[in-house]
Image (spheres, grey):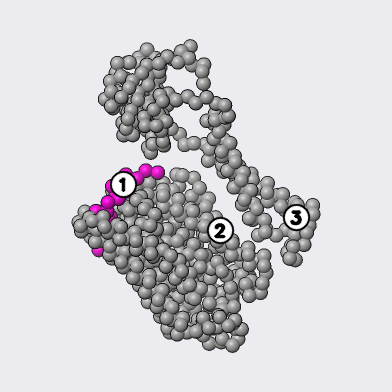
Amino acid sequence: MNQELHFTPSPRTRLLLRLLAGVGVLSLLAGAALAPERAWGSLFMASYALVCLGLSGTFFIALTYACGASWAVALRRIPEAMSAVMPFGAVGVAAVLLFRPSLYPWTHEAAAHELSGFKAAWLNWPFFLARAAVYFAVWLLFTRLIVRTSRAQDRDGDPAHTFRNTKLSVAFLPLFAVTFSMASVDWIMSLEPEWYSTIFGVYTFSGLFSSGLAVIILLAIWMRRTGPLRDFVTEEHLHDLGKLLFAFATFWMYIWFSQYMLIWYANMTEETVHFIARQRSFWLPLLVLNVILNWGIPFLALLPKFTKRTPSTLAKVAAVVIAGRWLDLYMMVQPTVTAGAITFPWIELGVMAGAGALVVVVFLRAFRQAPETPVRDPYLTESLHYHN
Amino acid sequence: MSRLLLVGVFEKEDDILSVTRAAKDQGLSIVDVYAPYAVHGLERALGLKASKISVVCLLAGIAGAVLKLWFEVWASTFDWPVDVGGKPWNSLPAFVPMTFEVMVLFAGVATVTALFIATGLRPGRKPKAVVPGVTDDRFALVIEETDAAFDLPAVHRLLEEHNAVLIEERVEETEAP
């Protein structure tokens, strides 16, 4: 087991990671010189994606503790290590909020946007920053506490740690629902200050969790193939992760359509503005592609049983969902950055590629800090013998 | 015609799983296994093929969705157009929720119906428990004597090795369902 702790990726993987990181840094620098607005927008998109990825790790752990899901214990170190990504995303989001508030139209042209009394009061910069600080404090605190308790159990095997983490998880889940909903409204919905969508928090959550599951699946398959989790993650675990991905891809579609149909049906100017900007010219095929990548392909591909149990197929579907995640964020943010103009997204793709390399590096570092599976969790045996 | 059945009764999940695997390995003809609940891994030990019921569910779902979509387009565009909020007659987003509901209805009802037909569950059917305990706390394996090479004492020994609490030989008329 100790040898596995020092798992390092193959030279080819390391070269690929360096290349991706280089692409990310270069895209950001070149973007900053050529199109600063888009560079800041892409930095925000990538940082927000990292925050969501970290949160999806914590959310996955909290969910399994809260409902006593013993099956996921064997692979719990993967979401634990993923949650280490969150601080890096937090730094990026903080940089955008602090140094580029002009990304948010209400900070500098409030008069042009006739906001209602409450909205005008809610959207003021100091309060906006204070709220962001509170969200990050809650997320980082709970992530740290839950991961620390899980790792403390490796040393003494005391079931009290399981009870403590269950309590922490039950406290975290409603807090997460409220804070993440508000953070999405603050950071993304307010890019279009007039726009209202009461389901927006649920929509961003659905994207967070389906893409988070896709990343958990890819990392689990990788760690299974290259060694550390070879004896711990079975086809049964992959089958269940596949079922969850299938369910949450469909949940994403359900929420996407709920938002779209109500806005389309009511046809109110302050609501339709969002979709009108995303149906013009080239945005329309992207809007359709978004639905295909995030729901169409995963839904059809994961319908039969064998695709969820075949690692290579499951990994391909997960990759499609991750591509869909990028497009989903791009559709949310980009039309507000470029005022509806469409350009080839080389900055946005490049920065996200760099963020992907960062995720892998941070994940591996965090993954190596503890045994590859919660060795003394009372539910580990049950998880290893899990059968669908 | 009649056939000889050998019924082995077991008390533990592990025993029924291991005896089923062993009987399968020896090429014995297993008529069925009875258990008070769904035993994980039993379908694999028995070598059962995947159920076709999911195919029924898929096809019925597609049929429901297509029929409902066709009906909505026909009703609101061709047969009786009604102006709702100035929307075009043929407004797909408005049709989606009902299409989804009817798809679920068709798929659900068809799946349950197919299950009842496939398992022969119908009103007035007499329950047939191989031994009374299988609805409570016993597991039963039923093996059929297939040909002259069937070694009865060896099968008895096999069942005993896996902690059978009761072994019964029965003669059954094969015409009975």
Tell me if mark 2 has few (under 14), some (14-19) or many (20+) residues whose alpha carbon lies within 10 angstroms of its own: some
Q: Residue at x 75, y 52 (%)?
A: B75
Q: Which residue is mark 2?
A: A254
Left or right of A248, for residue A6: left
Q: Which residue is mark 3?
A: B76
Indicate yes or no whether the magenta region holds residue A188.
Answer: no
Q: Are marks 3 and 1 on the same chain?
A: no
> Which quadrant holds residue B36?
top left
Point out the frontmost of discs 3 and 1.
1
- Residue drawn at 41 percent across, 37 percent down: B38
In the rendered structure, which amino acid carries the disc numbered 3?
Ser
- Above or below: residue A127 compared with residue A349: below
Do the residues marked 2 and 1 share a common chain? yes
User: Which chain hosts label 3?
Assistant: B
B84 displayed left or right of A135: right
User: Which residue type does callout 1 highlight?
Assistant: Glu
Residue A13, image x, y percentages: 33, 61
Name the magenta segment's main secondary structure.
loop
Instruction: Give the residue number, with chain letter if any, for mark 1.
Output: A382
The chain letter under disc 1 is A
Rounded to the nearest angstrom, the CA distance separating label 2 from label 3 is 24 Å
Residue at 67% x, 69% y is A267
Tag 3 secondary structure = helix
Q: Amino acid at mark 2?
A: Tyr
Magenta residues span: A367-388
Q: Secondary structure at mark 1?
A: helix
